[in-house]
Amino acid sequence: MIFKVLTQLGKTYTDEIEYTIVRNEDGDTGILNNHTPIILHIGKGYLKFVKDKNESFLVVEQAVVEFKDNELNILALEAQMGATLDKATHAFDMMKKEKLETTKKENIDFSKQERELKENIMKSKAGQL
């Protein structure tokens, strides 16, 4: 079967696998070739991909997994791949930390610009007759 991953940032992974195990809030679900079509939701969890006895992991957040016609499609808010579950989880946590730092910086920059704008409006006496 083929799997494809798409995130909100357009990041994609694609490969051919023998089977996958989906871990979500409801437990584990195994999906093999010719499986009945299925749609699963993952709040936070992971998928284990197996090909030629090699495993890889995809840690996801807010994802929808759809399997149909031997194609596994994963649409996720966030996703990180790793050779082991620990590596994938570590990459996921680091990516989330970087995003948080960027958001904090953007918020500080926005607050500074907003403050400067208010000061300039006051100095120009805009809106006063």
Image (cartoon, grey):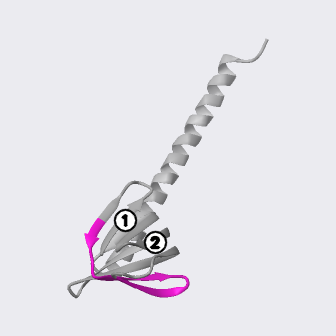
Task: Assess disc 1: are there few (<14), some (14-19) or many (≥20) residues with their C-alpha within 10 Å of its C-alpha.
Answer: many
Q: Which residues are magenta?
A: 14-32
At a point 38% along the width and 54% down the height, the residue shown is 10
Circle 2 sits on which residue?
Answer: 65
* Residue 11 picture quarter: bottom left
Q: Nearer the viewer, residue 30 or 33?
A: 33
**Residue 91 visible somewhere in the drawing:** no
Circle 1 sits on which residue?
Answer: 5
Q: Farthest residue in the left direction?
A: 52
At a point 50% along the width and 46% down the height, the residue shown is 106
Q: Farthest residue in the top direction?
A: 129
- Dividing the image into 4 quarters, which one contains the N terminus? bottom left
**Residue 1 visible somewhere in the drawing:** yes
Q: Identify the secondary structure beneath mark 1.
A: strand
Task: Assess disc 2: are there few (<14), some (14-19) or many (≥20) residues with their C-alpha within 10 Å of its C-alpha.
Answer: some
Residue 8 place in picture, x, y as percent:
45, 56
**What kind of residue is marked 1?**
Val
Q: Nearer the viewer, residue 55 or 99?
A: 55
At a point 45% along the width and 53% down the height, the residue shown is 102
**What kind of residue is marked 2?**
Val
Between the residue at mark 2 and the residue at mark 1, the CA separation in whole angstroms equals 9 Å
Magenta residue check for 16: yes
